[in-house]
Image (spheres, grey):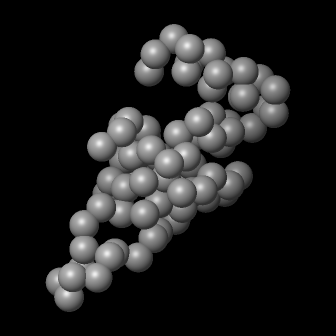
């Protein structure tokens, strides 16, 4: 994580006193979770919504899934 982004994340956590806000700058970027990688769509105090990479066997997109914020690791753009 670059220094400017780290300062932004630290500022958000300091201002709102909630650990999940550290993920706000990563909305719309790729993240890693125990359920797989995908694009972070939304962040809430108790869960994050992620759109996974890949497709189902029938060619349709995979369904979005939710995981706790502590299970989300930003990996950057893809």
Q: Position of residue 58 (x, y in %)?
A: 20, 88
Quarter of the figure that contains the C terminus: top left
Quarter of the figure that contains the N terminus: top left
Q: Residue at x 47, y 69 (%)?
A: 65
Corner quadrant of residue 38: bottom left
Q: Position of residue 54 (x, y in %)?
A: 25, 66
Give the tally of numbered discs: 0
Q: Which of the pair 24/14 is nearer the observer?
A: 24
Corner quadrant of residue 18: top right
Q: Is residue 77 visible?
A: yes
Q: Residue at x 41, y 76 (%)?
A: 63
Q: Is 36 placed above or below 32 here?
A: below
Q: Is 66 placed above or below 42 here?
A: below
Furthest residue in direction left, as rendered: 57
Q: Which of the pair 5/45 is nearer the observer?
A: 5
Q: Which of the pair 16/25 is nearer the observer?
A: 25
Q: Is residue 14 left or right of residue 53?
A: right
Q: Residue at x 29, y 82 (%)?
A: 60
Furthest residue in direction bottom, as rendered: 58
Q: Residue at x 72, y 21 (%)?
A: 11
Q: Is residue 35 left or right of residue 66?
A: left
Corner quadrant of residue 29: top left
Q: Position of residue 27 (x, y in %)?
A: 55, 46
Q: Is 44 placed above or below 75 here?
A: below
Q: Is residue 34 visible?
A: no
């Amino acid at each position: 994580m670059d220094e400017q982004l780290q300062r932004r994340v630290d500022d958000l956590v300091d201002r709102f006193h909630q650990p999940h806000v550290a993920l706000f700058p990563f909305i719309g970027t790729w993240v890693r979770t125990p359920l797989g990688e995908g694009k972070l769509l939304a962040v809430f105090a108790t869960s994050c919504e992620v759109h996974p990479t890949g497709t189902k066997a029938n060619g349709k997109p995979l369904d979005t899934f939710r995981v706790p914020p502590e299970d989300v690791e930003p990996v950057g753009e893809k």
